[in-house]
Each structure stands twice: as C-alpha cells, then as structure tokens.
Image (tube, helix red, strand yellow):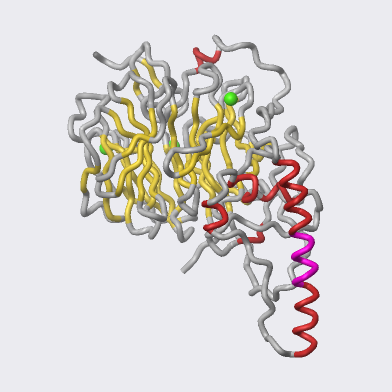
Amino acid sequence: MTPQKFCPYCGEENEQEAKYCRDCGRIFPDLESQRPSTESDPTPIKPPQPLGSNSNRNTYIGIAVVIFLLAVVSGAWLLTSSSDADPEPTAVAPATSDDHENNENIKDTATPNQFATSENFVVEQPSALPPTPTIAIGVSSITPTPTSAIGPTKSPTATMSPTPSPTLTPGPEELVFQSNRDGDYEIFIVDLDGQDLRQLTNNSAPDNFPRVSPNGRQIVFQSERDGNIEIYIMDRDGNNQRRLTTEPAKDRLPAWSPDGTQIVFSSNREDPSRSNVFDIYIMDLDGNNLRKIGENTPYESHPSWSVNDLLVFNVTDSGTDYWQIYSANIDGSDRRRLTRSQDDEWSPEWSPDGRYILFHSERDNAANPGIYTMNADGSDARMIYNSSREEWGASWSTDGSQIVFAVDQPDGTADLFIMDANGNNARRFLERGGYPSWAPAPQQ
Ligand SMILES: [Ca+2]
Ligand SMILES: [Ca+2]
Ligand SMILES: [Ca+2]
C-alpha cells in the first residue's frame, strides 16, 4: 500500500510498478533504458512533416497573395495618404475566424514560419490573438542552432506593413520554469535571450510547476516547503510568497483563470489516504470560495482554463489506466472526452485564443511520446514534434506563435526548447529546466 517510488522530476510518491508519475506525468527513467538507444547528438529529430500534401502549393499561393495584397494596400495607402482622403489606411486583413473555421488546416495558415522565408517579414499571427503581435521571437533565427544554449533572438526586423500601427512595447516577456540546478527544485525566471537568470524561490523542498498570471505580475506554483504539497503564489520577482491551500492532502498543478482572479488545481483532499483519487478544484486568489469541479473519477489532473471558460484536464478511470483528455465547463457540466486512444495522452494546455489544445501523447509510439495539438473539440489531433527523447511540460507563448517545452537529456537532466507553433524551428533555449511558463509583459 505504501508508495515506494519517488518521481525524480517532482518528488511525487508512486507505486513501485508505476510506469509514469501520477503527479507530473513524466515517464520514469528506468523506462528510458528500455527504449531504443538514443543518438549521442542531442539535436531533436523532426517528425514526418505533419502538413497536408498541398501545403507547399498553398504556401506559395499564400505568399503570392500576401505579396499581392501588400502591393495593393501599399499603393492604396500611398494614394490615400497623398490625397489626405483617409487618415487611417486599411491594413492587410489577417485571417478571420470564419476563414479558419472553414479551413481545417489551420496551422498551415496560422503559423508564422510558413511566411518566414524572408528575414524581413512581419508575421501575421493567428486570428483572435492578444494584441502583442510583432515580438516575432525566433523569426530572425531561421537557421536552427540547437547545439547552442543561446535562446531565440528578438527580431530587429523592420515593419513592412504600411499601417502606422500603434507603438508596441515588446518586452519584457520572460520565461519562468522549474530547475533543480542547485540541488532541489526551485523556480527561476530568465530573459527570452537566455540571459539574466534569476532564482525566485530558495528552500530545500521541491518548488515546481510555475504558471505566470495573465497580467504577468504573479506566479502560482506548488511547493512542499511546509511538509506537503500546497499551492503558493508570489510576485513575478519572487517577493510576497504566500500559501493558498492548507490541506494535508496533495494540492498541485495550478493554473490561472483567464481573468487572473482564480486558480484551478488538482487535489486528493477528499480522501488523502487514497493516492489515486484526485479531483479538480477552483479557488480565489486568497484561497477562499473553494469548490470541486467534475465527477468522482478516480483521477483528474493537470487542468487548463481557456479564454472561453472551458477546462481541459487528463483523466484516468482506474488510476492505472491510460490517461485521456477531457473538457468541461468551469462548473463541471458538459463533460466531454476529447481523446480516445489506447495510449497515454496528458498535460493539455489551451492555446491563448482557446482554439487549440497542446498535449503530450504516446498514440504513435508508446516508447517515445511526442508533442501534439488538436482543436478544442478534440478533432484534427496531430503530432507537431517528436525527438527520440521524451518531451514534456509543453506550453504556449503569450501570443500563441511559439511553444516551449522540456526535453530529457542522456545525463538525466532536461533542457528547455522553443519552437514555432507548427513544430518548426525547434532549438535549445536553456539547459536544466522543466515546466516552462511564458511570462507576458507585466500589465497594470
Ligand atoms: Ca526548493
Ligand atoms: Ca496540501
Ligand atoms: Ca519524444
């Protein structure tokens, strides 16, 4: 009955025969040794191109259309500006929701790298994204240099758009993550160029799974500093750390509501003696107004809350069965199963616009999980990236154009990688990191 196996990644207790950690979802390293030998080259292997067979043709057509529209709009802008007839030149229209709803191949048109063949393009972001469009992280680094520990560079490119767009302040977006580089897990924050690493927690207990608030000002995370796993919150600079839960149970894997006023998390507080019985809970930022979401399924974990007020989370019916991904309203109603495989699928994360779900899956290779995306209703699931090693903890950039994730390394550590949202241009960002959370520029 007593758990005998400790997860090397998050410290969670697990059954001795467990295949993966019930807390963080990581596959145990002893399973790693059963896998086909990994190459000494740490360069991730690109999966088979997931795009449709018409993608190249569509890309060329798309580029031609964009160039044509730019020419037309530029001409129109010159004419209108010279005549002072219209003080607000019309911009090249980004793809609309309707466009995408009639186009199942959304990532073909929505991802920046399709148009990044010229170093000076300003990339159109997917529609309905937050208004932080032209940070263009990584657009200038078209050539992958995964052996370098240097992160993506902020694009110095000039704007080609004729639109006199409002001045945007690109930074300071940063990356928050967990690392045991000092011996036990702590929370760190680092610039997007990989510089100015700062440690935000400092104690001998595990501090894991940081998630930055939508306004960029706070970080919620889990910590065992008070004897059992609890939810904590702190300012972005590490100040004002305080505990939100006070249960002897395990309270973990927190995530933010889109308005930043509530936290959703997983807890076995209903019966702490049963290590598999976890449920989803929501509480206010002061820990009050707690309520349980969902059914009494033995194990519900890793919730993510969309801008459309939908939850996604992974569920295993028996605690030892395969994990599958479900969605539900924030009151637990309209519960829907989104994946139906006979393999583990876990760690769902909503895209910032609430239209896609990022997750990890073994559906194509039980010994080598990869990174996948699917639509909000579970349709069009596709692998976007897989290397011979295990990827985990994937999450989105603030604008949805990038994905950051961890990749296990042969020495038992994990490194952080960043790639475009379609799986292209993956490159190592930083050594020794996990569960990254993209920190938006702080807002009021
Ligand atoms: Ca610690
Ligand atoms: Ca607790
Ligand atoms: Ca893999």
Apparent side of residue 43 relative to residue 223 in the rendered image (left or right): right
The number of callouts visible is 0
Quarter holding the N terminus is: top left
Q: Position of residue 218 (x, y in %)?
A: 43, 56
Q: Where is residue 401 in the image (x, y as percent from the top left)?
A: 61, 50
Hey, which quadrant is residue 378 in on the image? Answer: top left
Q: Please state which of residues 179 and 314 is positioned toward the viewer in this rendering.
A: 314
User: Where does the image place residue 388, in percent across and percent down from the top left?
Assistant: 63, 21
The residue closer to the viewer here, 443 or 162, is: 162
Left or right of 70, for residue 396:
left
Residue 73 located left or right of residue 129: right
Extreme-top residue of the structure: 34
- Name the spot of residue 254 as percent of width and height, x first: 37, 43
Residue for point 70% across, 41% down: 55
Q: Give the range drawn in magenta.
A: 66-73
**Residue plotted at (57% across, 34% down):** 406
Q: Does the magenta stretch include residue 422?
A: no
Please determine whether, in this image, residue 128 is positioned above or below residue 55: below
Single out the residue that lies furthest toward the bottom.
Answer: 84
Classify 305 as above or below 78: above
> What residue is shown at x 68% (from left), y 50% (from top)?
112
Among the 4 quarters of the image, the one containing residue 299? top left
Q: Inspect this view and state whether residue 217 appears.
A: yes
Q: Which of 199 and 77 is in front in this view?
A: 77
Q: Is the magenta stretch mostly helix, strand or loop?
A: helix
Left or right, 441 with respect to 263, comes to right
| The quarter of the picture showing ligand 1 | top left
